[in-house]
Image: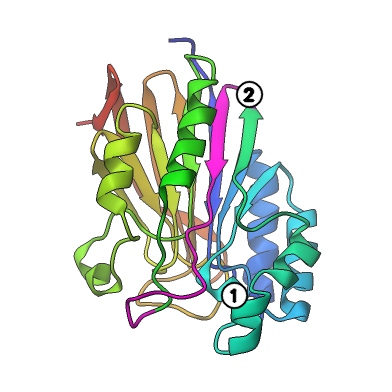
Amino acid sequence: MKPTGLRIAQISDLHFGRDVPAIAQTLRAELRDAAPTLIAVCGDLTQRARTVEFQAARAFLDQLPAPALVVPGNHDLPGWRVWSRIARPWRNWRQQMLTDANGTVIHTGDGLVAVGVNTARQWSLHPDWSRGRINIRQLNEISEAFDDAPRDALRVVVAHHPFLLTEPGRYRGLVGRSRLALQHLHRRADLLLGGHIHLAYSGVVSGLVIAQCGTAFSDRLKGEPNSYNLIEAEGDRMTVSIRRWDGDRFDTHQRTEYVRDGHEWRTYS
C-alpha cells in the first residue's frame, strides 16, 4: 500500500456559550503549527443551539487552517424548546453551517476519504434524548463513498456519539444500532471518530480503530481536562495522540500506535 502521510486533527464538543476563549485561541494556533490534512469536528458546536452560539462557532471554523468536516451533536438541537425541536430542529444549523444537517458529508483527497454522519436525533424512545442513533440509509451512504474510493485511501467515519465506551463513560450508552454499524463497517472502514462524552481514549473494535476525544475548549469537563486528538497515518500504521490542556498549552498525554494486518487493525506492541 502506498504511504498516505495523513494527519487528522479531531476536535469535539466546542459548546460555544460555555467556551473558554483563551483555550480556543491556543488550540487554533496549535492546529496551524500541526498543519493537518483534515480537521474532524465531532459535534456539539453549541450549548443551546442559539443563533449567537452558531455564529461564534461559524467564526471559529472560518479561521481553521485546514479543511474541516463538521457534523452536528445533540446540543445543536433546540433542547427543550419543543416546537422548534419538532418543527424546525436544524434551522439555525442550516443558516450558519450552510449544510443539510441530515445529509452525508464527504471529504476526499490526499489519500483520504472521510464521511460525516449525523447521529443526533429529535426524539428517542429512550428517556435520555441526548443519546444518538445511526440508520441503514446512513450506513449505505458510507459504504457507497468507500466503495468508490481508491484502494489505498484511508477510510474515516466522523460522528458525534460513541461506538466504544470505557468504564468511566459506560452509563452514557453507545450510539443506537452500534453493533449493526460495526458489522457493516467491518473491513470497509479504518477509523471511526466520535465525541459526546467528554472523555478521550482510543481502541480497536471489529478491526476498526475508534478514537474518542474530550471537549476541546468548553468548561463542561467530565473528570478530564480539555483535549483534542492528533491522528497520524502512513501506510499500514496509525498513531492516535491525545493532547491534553495543562493550563498553558496542549501536551501529549497518551500516544497509542496501531498496525493494519490485511483489512484488520490492531494495537501495535
> Residue 114 appears in which quarter of the rendering?
top right
Is residue 100 toward the left or the right of residue 4 in the image?
Answer: right
Identify which residue is drawn at 28% across, 54% down.
Answer: 164
Is residue 9 or residue 182 the one in the foreground? Answer: 182
Chain-order first, disc 2 or disc 1: 1
Q: Which of the 4 image quarters holds residue 60?
A: bottom right
**Residue 82 in the image: x percent, y percent?**
58, 88
Instruction: Rate crowding at label 1 as few (under 14), some (14 to 19) or many (20 or more) other CA atoms within 10 Å.
Output: many
Dots 2 and 1: beta carbons under 8 Å?
no
Q: Residue 229, position in %: x, y? A: 47, 50
Could you tell me which quadrant the N terminus lies in? top left
| Disc 2 target residue | 110
x then y, percent, for residue 32: 70, 46
Name which residue lies at 54% across and 21% down. Answer: 149
Given residues 240 and 261, the one toward you in this image is: 261
State how far apart marks 2 and 1 are (Cα).
33 Å
| SS type, badge 2 | loop
The amino acid type, in three-letter code, at marker 2 is Asp
Q: Which mark is residue 104?
A: none
Instruction: Tell me what residue is drawn at x 74 percent, y 45 percent.
Output: 65
Q: Is residue 5 magenta?
A: no
Q: Viewed as shown, does residue 55 lie left or right of 46?
A: right
Residue 5: tell me if it is visible: yes
Give the structural element (helix, strand or loop) at label 1.
loop
In magenta, the rendered stretch is 109-128
Report the front residue among 187 and 224: 187
Q: Which mark is residue 77?
A: 1
Q: Position of residue 89 (x, y in %)?
A: 64, 73
How many neighbours does mark 2 have within 10 angstroms: few (below 14), some (14-19), or many (20 or more)? few
